Amino acid sequence: MKKLFTGLQPSGALHIGNYFGALKQTVELCQTHDGLVMVADYHALTSLRDPQELRSNIIDIVRSYVAVGLDPKKTTLFQQASVQEHTEIAWIFDCLVSVSFLELAHAYKDKVAKGLEANAGLFTYPMLMAADILLYDTDIVPVGADQRQHVEYAREAAAKFNTAFGTTFKEPKEMILEAVAVVPGTDGKKMSKSYGNTIPLFGTKDEITKAVMSIVTDSSGDKPENVYKIHRALKSESQLAPLYEVNRGKYKAIKEALVEDIEELVAPMRAIYDSITESDVRDILKEGGHRARAIASKKMHDVCQKIGVAI
């Protein structure tokens, strides 16, 4: 099977945009690929400074992946910080790329434009992500449409290393499912924790209802577009057409229907999520870390031999 790698930052509570844009896709792909799924905790340090929150978010991500159907016995689910080779190889890549190359990163420019501190970690973020991907001879990286450049940067890092020291890293390809890549938030923008426009993935029905009822509606069209775009993540156009036709102009009724559809999807997963203990999470990460390190250490040994630091 082809090897698939993906990661998710533990930077806040997960929302339904994470489910449709990443989690659901990951679970499906891991059924037909040799999957490695990483909790990207070091990446979160570019913006998160609360250790208690970070620990809680790491646990939340593991519980979430298992709740939505990921089998940690078949897929390697691990914590980035437990595999030191990620940061080691990231430094080597930093030494191969130029400052001007990193300055072209869309994510860096966008975050700085939004007021996020321009720390060095944020600037070199693409090379740590390249290390994440390349360590495992990854074939495929499922990403959102706005993250395509990260995989391009990984290919560039691989090419630069291979040119300088001999063929070592496989150049991965991105896989983007355009239909579910971006889920709008309650304000119509991309659903994001940083925008405060999310619908919680494992929230109670009351919490989901509160979020859905806050969706900004546009009365100029024949249907509330922001509500409809979120609804389309759950159901097809043909399934939704009768509902929106019968309730034309009745935004409250349409939002209530969206709440019920979200609850129908989430309730079974929420029950599994609530049943997973912190002890379960530690066991999963311990086993996943062991498997990931076995692969990463072998690659690191090869790298050290080629760059000349192995005496």
Image (cartoon, grey):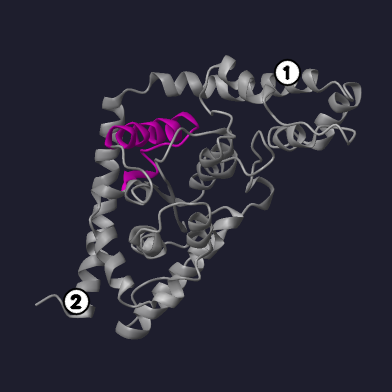
Q: Earlier in the sequence, mark 1 or mark 2?
A: 1
- Looking at the image, residue 33 sits to the left or right of residue 55; the answer is right
Q: Position of residue 95 (x, y in %)?
A: 30, 76
Q: Are the two marked residues, 1 and 2, in contact with CB atoms closer than 8 angstroms?
A: no
Q: Position of residue 20 (x, y in %)?
A: 60, 39
Taking the spot 31% from the left edge, 42% from the top edge, the residue there is 49
Q: Position of residue 92 (x, y in %)?
A: 28, 72
| Residue type marked 1 | Glu
User: For numbered disc 2, what is the local secondary structure?
Assistant: helix
Above or below residue 73? Residue 247 is above
Q: Residue furthest top?
A: 206
- Looking at the image, residue 112 sits to the left or right of residue 43; the answer is right
Figure quadrant of the C terminus: bottom left
| Residue type marked 2 | Gln
User: For numbered disc 1, what is the local secondary structure?
Assistant: helix
- Is residue 137 among what the camera can see? no
Q: Residues within 10 Å of mark 1 (few under 14, many from 20)?
A: some
| Separation of residues labelled 1 and 2 (CA atoms) | 61 Å
Quadrant in the rendering for residue 288: top left
Magenta-drawn stretch contains 300? no
Q: Which residues are magenta?
A: 51-79
- Is residue 266 among what the camera can see? yes
Residue of label 2: 305
Q: Nearer the viewer, residue 47 or 35?
A: 47
Q: Residues within 10 Å of mark 2 (few under 14, many from 20)?
A: few
Quadrant in the rendering for residue 218: top right
Residue of label 1: 256
In front: label 1 or label 2:
1
